[in-house]
Image: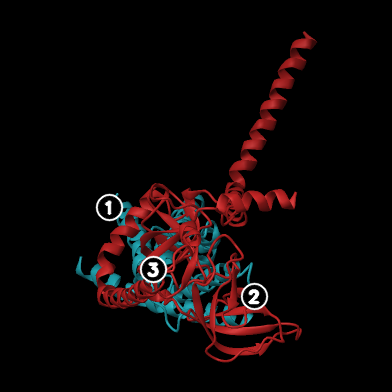
Chain colours: A cyan, B red
Amino acid sequence: MMRFINHLICFVGLIAIQVFVLDNVHFMGVFLPLIYIYALLRLPADMSPNMTMILGFLLGLSMDVFSNTPGMHAFATTLIAVMRYPVLRLFVSKEELSNKNVSEKSLGMGAFWKYTILLVFVHHTTLFILESFSFVNWLLLLAKIPLCSLLTMLFIFALERINSREDAKS
Amino acid sequence: MSGDLAFVWNIRRITWRMYNFFRFIAKYSTVLLFIILQSCALYLLFNHNNFQQSALFSSSNRMNGFLFSVEESVTGYFHLRDNNEALLKENDKLQLENARLKSALLQYRDTSGIPLLRMKEADEYSLIPGRVIHNNVTHLHNFLTLNIGKEDGVLPEMGVANADGIVGVVSQVSQHYSVVIPVLNPQIVRFSCKLKNSNASGSLVWDGVDRRYAYLEEIPPYVSVSKGDTVVTSGFSAIFPEGIMVGTVEEYEIGEDANYLKLKIRLAARFDALSNVRVIRYKLREEIKKVEEEASL
C-alpha cells in the first residue's frame, strides 16, 4: 500500500513539475527535458504488463491534456510501457528482477542506465516523429531527439541521486 | 436416446469453443490491450481538429483552467515590472493620440455638415480584455490559455492581439477559459498579412524554430521590399481588422520557385512574455460568414 501511494505521488508530482516548471524551461528555444516518463521507468518490475500499459497510457494522456496534444504523449508512453519488461530482461536476469524496485541501486549502474537510455530514446523518437507529422523539419527533428534525450537523462540522473539518498536514510 | 447424446455433444463442443476463445483472449491479452490503447491514442491524434475538438482533452476544461490560473497567480508576479512598463507605454501612446485627435476635432468643429470620423468602422469591432494564464512557447504546436471564456463573449475564430501586435486566434472556448493558437504554431492558421507601404499581401507562417521570427510567404516578386518595412494585418478575413501591427521585415529572399518572395519577419509581440491581451470581436462576422457560405454554394 505504501508503495502504491509512493508511486501515485511520483506520477502526480512529475506531471506537475513537467507542466508547470519544465515546459517553461527551454535551452536555445526548442530543447526541453521530458522527465514525466521517470514515473513509468520506476514502476516495480513485477507489475503485470497490462497494468503497466494502462498506467503508461494514463500518464501520457494526462500529459496530453495539459499540452493540448491528445494521443501524442499517450502513444509514446504506451509503447515504452510495453517495452519495459523485455528491455529490463535484456540486461538483468529473471531472479534478480523478482519483487524489486527498478532503481540504479537495486539493478546496478550499468543495467539501469542501459535500460533508461534505451527507453528514453525510444520515447523521444516516437514523440517527436508524431509531433512533426503535419510539419516536417528534418534538421530540427534530428537535433531534437538526441539533445532532448540527453537533457531528460540528466534530470533522471539527478532524481536518482535524490532517491538513493532517501533510500539510504530510511 | 441418440438425440439426447447429440445434444450433450453439441453443448460440450460449444463450451469447448468458448473455453478456447477465452484462453485465446487470456493468452494474447497484452497484445490486444496494446493494440486497443494505441488505436485510442492514434484516433485521438488524428481526429484532433483544431477548431471543433472537444474541450475535454484540452486545457480549456475546468480543472486545467483552474490549475493554470493558480500557476499564473504565482508566476504572474515575475513579469509585473515589464507589464507595468508596457502598459505605461501604451498609455502614453493613447494619450498622445487622444490629444492629437482632440486638436484635429477642434480644427474641424466649425465646418459643419462633414462627417468627422469614420464612426462606422470603429463600431464594427469591440475588444475583450483578458490575461494569459498559461503560455507555451517550447513546443512545435504551441498554445495559450486565457482567463476569459464564453461568459465574456469570446467565441472560436476570434483574433487575439496585445499592445505590440497580433498574437493568434481563439480555437476553443469553455465557460470561463479559452485556448488560443498563437502565430507560433505551424499547423493550422495562416494569417493574412500585408506590407504596409506597398499593400502587397501574403500569408504568415512559423517554421517551428525561432519564436522571435515568422515568415511572410506568397508576396509577388515585383514588390519592392526593404529591411525594416512594417507588416500589418490585411483585413481579408473576419479574424483581424485591417492594419494591426504584425512585425517588421528582417530579411528577404526569393522563394524556391522564384515566383514569390519569402520575407523573414521579426514579430512585434514577444511571445515568451505575454500577459495582457485583447480578444477582437468583429460584430459583422456572422454576416460575412453567411454571405461567403452562400457564395461558395
Disc 2 with disc 3 on a shared chain:
yes
Q: State the quadrant of the C terminus of chain A.
A: bottom left
**Which three-letter amino acid code belongs to the residue tagged 2?**
Gly
For mark 3, what is the residue? B109
> Within 10 angstroms of label 3, few (less than 14), some, or many (20 or more) residues?
few
Report the residue at 55% width, 67% height from top. Answer: A127
Residue B234, percent from left and from top? 58, 71
The residues bearing labels 2 and 1 have C-alpha atoms spaced at a distance of 60 Å
The residues bearing labels 2 and 3 have C-alpha atoms spaced at a distance of 40 Å
Report which quarter residue B64 is drawn in.
bottom left
The residues bearing labels 3 and 1 have C-alpha atoms spaced at a distance of 80 Å
The label nearer to you, 2 versus 3, is: 3
| Observer-nearest of A115 and B229 | B229
Q: Chain of mark 2?
A: B
For mark 2, what is the residue? B202
For mark 1, what is the residue? A2
**Which three-letter amino acid code belongs to the residue tagged 1?**
Met
